[in-house]
Amino acid sequence: MSGKIPLITLEEHFISQAVLDYYAQQGVETTLPESHSHIMSSLRDVGPQRLKSMDAGQVCTAANNELHEAISSSPRPDRFAAFAMLPTLHPEAAAKELDRCVSELDFVGSLIDNMAEGRFYDDTFFWPIFAAHERLDVPVYLHPAPHPLTEASPLHGNYAPQVSAFLANHGFSWHAEVALHLLRLFASKLFDTHPHLKVILGHMGEMLPYQLDRIHKLIQRTWPASSKPRRHLLQVWHENIYITTAGMFSLAPMACLIHMCCADKVLYSVDYPFCNNQEGLRFMHQLQNSGMVNEDDFEAIAHKNAERLLDLRITEGNDVGMDTIGENGEDGYRLRPWLSTESSTGLSTMTDLASSPLETVKE
C-alpha cells in the first residue's frame, strides 16, 4: 500500500433512471428541492465526473440493478461499493431484495428513507427489514427524507417560502426527525429483539450526540420500569449505532462526537454531490492536525472503521488518498486547547475527560 491514507465515504448519492421514470409516471418531475436541481447530472454519474470529484419493489430492483451495472462499468469499479434501495412499505419484499443485493450483487447494506409515507419504523410491521439486516450482518443507513410543505405547516413564518423549505428539510427538521426516529426505535425495544442490528446515522449523529447524556438520564429517571428496554440507551448507542461525518465539516461538533462515541463507531463521509469532496478533504486535514484524535483513531475514522463495518478491503497498491500535511501546513488548524492538562503557564488546569465513552454503558 502507498504512503497515502485511504479515505472511504458512505453517504454518497446516486439516482437511477428507473426511479426518475417511476416519479415521472406519478406526475412528479423531481424529488429534489428546487435549490438542488442543478446536481442531477452528478447524481446520475458513476464515471469520470464522480471519479474526478473524488480525486478532487420492481422500481427498487431495477434501481439496484442499474447501480450495480453502473459500478461494474465504471473506469474504477474497485473504488465503489453500494447500499441497496428497498421497498420499505413492503417489508417482506424489502427483506428479499436486501438478500438478493447482498448475496448476488455484493452490496454492503441498505440506505433507506427515514419514513415510509409518513410512517416510522418502530411499528413491528417494518421489523422484517431489520431482521434481514441482522441475519445478513449488514448495516442499515437511516437517511433523512425530503418533505413537501403544506399550507398549514408550522415551519412557515415571517420569511420567504424558500426559508420555510430550508427549515423543513436540510436546514433543521429532517435531522431532528432522524434523531426522533432513532429514539422511537429504541423505545419500541427493537434493539432488544435484534441486539446485533447495525444502524448508521449521518450528519455527525443528527444532533443526538449533544443531547444524548441528558436524554439517557431522563429516561432512567422518568420512564416506567415496564417501558424501559433491557439495554439502556447509551449501551445501544455504543454497541449498535455508527455515525458518519456526512455533510459536516466543523471540528466543534466533531469534538462532541468523539467524546460521545467509541473510536470504532465514527466514519468519514462527504454527502456527495450535495457537498464536495474537496471540502471533506480539508476537514480531514484539520482533524488530523487538531490534536483531537491520535493517529490510530484518525485512520480508523478515515477508512478502517468502514472496512470493518462493510467488510471492505483497500486494494493492494492503492494510490488514492490524502497526503499528510504537517502541523504548520495550510490545513494545520487547531482548536483552542482548553481541555489540555497544561495551561500557557505550564500549570495543570483540568483533568482528562473519561478515558472511554464505554464507561457509561454500565450505568
Image (cartoon, rainbow, N blue to C red):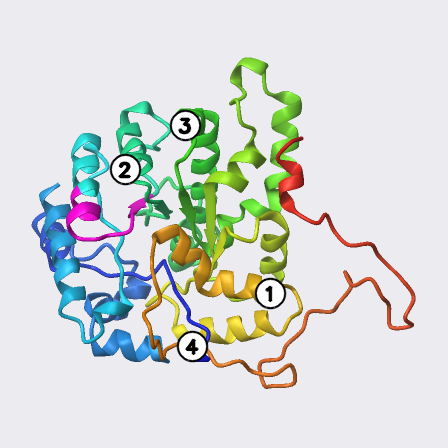
Q: Earlier in the sequence, mark 4 or mark 3?
A: 3
Instruction: Give the residue at mark 1.
Output: 251
Residue 95 at least partly seen? yes
- Give the Cα distance between marks 4 and 3: 38 Å
Circle 1 residues within 10 Å: few <14, some 14–19, many ≥20: some
Circle 2 residues within 10 Å: few <14, some 14–19, many ≥20: some
Circle 4 residues within 10 Å: few <14, some 14–19, many ≥20: some
The amino acid at mark 1 is: Leu
Q: Earlier in the sequence, mark 4 or mark 1?
A: 1
- The residue lying toward the viewer, choosing from 307 and 69, is 307
Q: Nearer the viewer, mark 4 or mark 3?
A: 3
Q: Earlier in the sequence, mark 2 or mark 4?
A: 2
Q: Is residue 216 above or below residue 1?
A: above
Image label count: 4
Where the C terminus falls, by quadrant? Answer: top right
Instruction: Give the residue at mark 4.
Output: 278
Instruction: Give the residue at mark 2.
Output: 116
- Residue at the spot x=30%, y=31% of the render? 131
Q: Position of residue 231 (x, y in %)?
A: 53, 27
Q: Position of residue 341 (x, y in %)?
A: 82, 62
The amino acid at mark 3 is: Leu
Q: Is residue 8 above or below residue 57?
A: below
Circle 3 residues within 10 Å: few <14, some 14–19, many ≥20: many
- Residue at the spot x=67%, y=40% of the render? 359
- The residue lying toward the viewer, choosing from 55 and 152, is 55
